Image: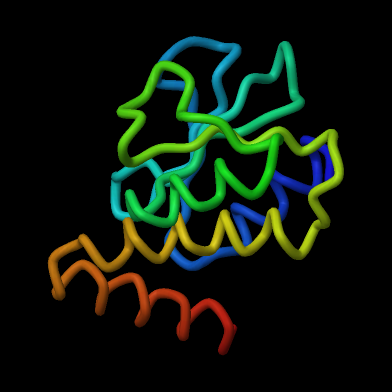
Amino acid sequence: MNIESLREYCISKAGVTEGFPFGEDTLVFKVGGKIFLLTSLNHPISFNVKCVPEKAIQLRELYTEVTPGYHMNKKHWNTVFYNGSLTNHQLKEMINHSYDLVFQSLPKIKQEEIKNDELDRKES
């Protein structure tokens, strides 16, 4: 995975927006206005993703490429280095987990709005 494929994968998900709320170096992906992934453009070798605390610890123990979230709440966020031995499938699983956690935390009305917008987009 590289920064281009990471971006393409993130923006392909329903309701995702991208922006630079922390400066021009940090690319942030949100669903429903909440962050699920951020990455540096100056050093595109890792990204931060949200994670269930127990799973976050498990992933850190299993993979040297997964560390506590840099500049994030280390209980809920991991930094994942994608220039190592993790497969694209493993990376996408971590991205999906983060997206799903954030999506499920949204109010039900917002979730339905995103789902409906996605259906409309696919029908167009």
Q: Residue at x 69, y 19 (%)?
A: 41
Q: Position of residue 86 (x, y in %)?
A: 79, 49
Between residue 93 and residue 62, name the one nearer to us.
62
Between residue 32 and residue 52, name the one nearer to us.
52
Q: Position of residue 15 (x, y in %)?
A: 43, 61
Q: Residue furthest front?
A: 61
Q: Position of residue 62 (x, y in %)?
A: 64, 49
- Asked if 12 appears above or below 124 in the picture, the reply is above
Q: Residue furthest bottom?
A: 123
Q: Residue at x 20, y 67 (%)?
A: 110
- Asked if 82 appears above or below 58 in the picture, the reply is above
Way the structure is coloured: rainbow
Q: Position of residue 60 (x, y in %)?
A: 55, 41
Q: Residue at x 40, y 66 (%)?
A: 100
- Asked if 121 appears above or below 19 in the picture, the reply is below
Q: Is residue 2 left or right of residue 81?
A: right
Q: Is residue 39 left or right of residue 22?
A: right
Total of numbered circles in the picture?
Answer: 0
Q: Residue at x 46, y 28 (%)?
A: 69
Based on the displayed image, in which of its 4 quarters is residue 61 positioned?
top right
Split into 4 quadrants, where in the image is the C terminus?
Answer: bottom right
